[in-house]
Image: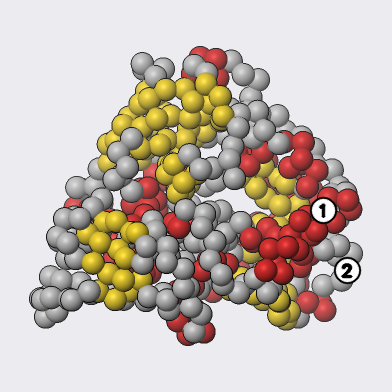
Amino acid sequence: MKIKTARKSIEEVRSLPGYRHVPLAPQPMFFRKLLKTLSAGELKKVGFRCEKEGMEKLESGEPCLILMNHSSFIDLKIASTLLYPRPFHIVCTADGFVGKEWLMRKIGCIPTFKFIPDPVLVRDMISTVRDLRESVLLFPEASYSFDGTATPLPETLGKLLKLMKVPVVMIRTYGAFQRDPLYNNLQLRDVPVTAKMTYLLSPEEIREKTPAELNGILKEAFSFDNWKWQLEKGVSVTEEFRADGLHRVLYKCPHCFEEGKMYGKGISLTCGSCGRSWTLKENGQLEEEKPENENDPSSVQFTHVPDWYAWERKCVREEILNGSYRMEIPVTIRVMADMKAVYEVGEGTLCHSEEGFHLTGCGGEIDFHLPPQLSYSLYADYFWYEIGDMISIGDAKIQYYCFPKDKAVNVAKARLAAEELYKTVSKKQPDRR
């Protein structure tokens, strides 16, 4: 999928009218049917089926909040099929509206910005269930999983459930990540996809529990490991391109500790610095070719992708704690200030440190700072709308999409660092409860 782009100066972008809030309207039956019809072909191809648990508790006309894990674009097709004919509105990243705002609103999408506090979104969601009497579909992770495990959930989610006062339904997919993992350059694999749809919480249960208790229930519901599931279920990914782009996730060599030298291609992941190589097997496990120094305590052995990614997170956390973490890179800057296009405005420098993100560029016209405590995670993406790997920062008025000029720069490390910096800063903040 691509996005409409244009070239403008940053001055021209700032003179645009900007975003406007549009009151939500009921989702027309025509578009519910359209979504279901357009989803049928791919779901048939993957042999889709769904197990339902407790769904008889939800009345046909009763609005609810649907929470769904986020693995790939097929998630929307699954939801459109499972929820039909129930009217529902989808919380969607605002850049998804670019060039097609009318259609997205007719489908029932509610725009928001990832990892940015958005009180307008909360009001829209409450209005949807209370005034329109229609349901809301929310991907609380906000971004596709990089490593096939759950990404952080917002700490305010429990409070949101208390405000909405409607049943909560959980849709958990199986095989969607294996079919189209974000790192693999939009190359689809021949993998069956299934789902489980569960009545998770009733309004009475929500009323009786504290936000912290609700957060605990949601964290448990969103605890999963797609690679472990693949191994345990004996699911084979036989495509010869299954390791293409895997270095986007596994960017640091566990032997020589070099970053930006890993390269995934075909079925292999190779370090360009020390030459060590791993094969990504059909069962999703990594096998190192001719391993050496197995008894060397400085040599870390990994067979499981999430274990390697967790080790990278640990390394980033150590850099933050010892004060050595810093990223400073030249970037091409694109900007979203309305829903007509994403505008390429020029070049600049993106810095990331314990002070947060700092973007400068366009001859001094851009000077934007995002403190670490304002975002519990980071909108980073691979091959964003087929343009390139990207880091996005911004606020409710403007979004900056930064594309590193050096292709060895890894946006996954930036996301890990943003999450770990948020945790570090949060621990230093006084408890205001």
Residue 78, horizontal then vertical, whole percent? 70, 64
Q: Position of 323 compared to 110: left or right?
A: left
189 to 391, vertically: above or below: below
Q: Residues within 10 Å of mark 2 (few under 14, many from 20)?
A: few
**Which one is in front in this view, the residue at disc 2 or the one at disc 1?**
1
Q: Quadrant of residue 44?
A: bottom right
Residue behind mark 2: 60
The residue depicted at 58 percent of the width and 40 percent of the height is: 2
* Amino acid type shown at disc 2: Ser
Query: What residue is at 15 percent from the left and 71 percent from the top?
Result: 299
Specify whether residue 280 is in view. yes
Instruction: Identify which amino acid the numbered label 1 is placed on.
Output: Leu
Is residue 211 visible to the viewer in this orientation of the structure? no
Residue at 68% in and 58% down: 76
SS at badge 2 = loop
**Residue 353 quadrant:** top left
* Residue 258 or residue 127, whichever sits in front: 258
Q: Is residue 127 above or below residue 177?
A: above
Across and down, in percent, residue 154 comes to 53, 56
Return the disc, 2 or 1, that comes first in the chain's sequence: 1
C-alpha gap between disc 2 and disc 1: 20 Å
Callout 2 touching callout 1 (CB < 8 Å)? no
Picture disc at residue 63 = none
Render colour scheme: secondary structure
* Residue beneath disc 1: 34
Residue 219, position in %: x, y? 53, 69
Residue 66, given in percent of the width and then of the height, sits at 71, 63
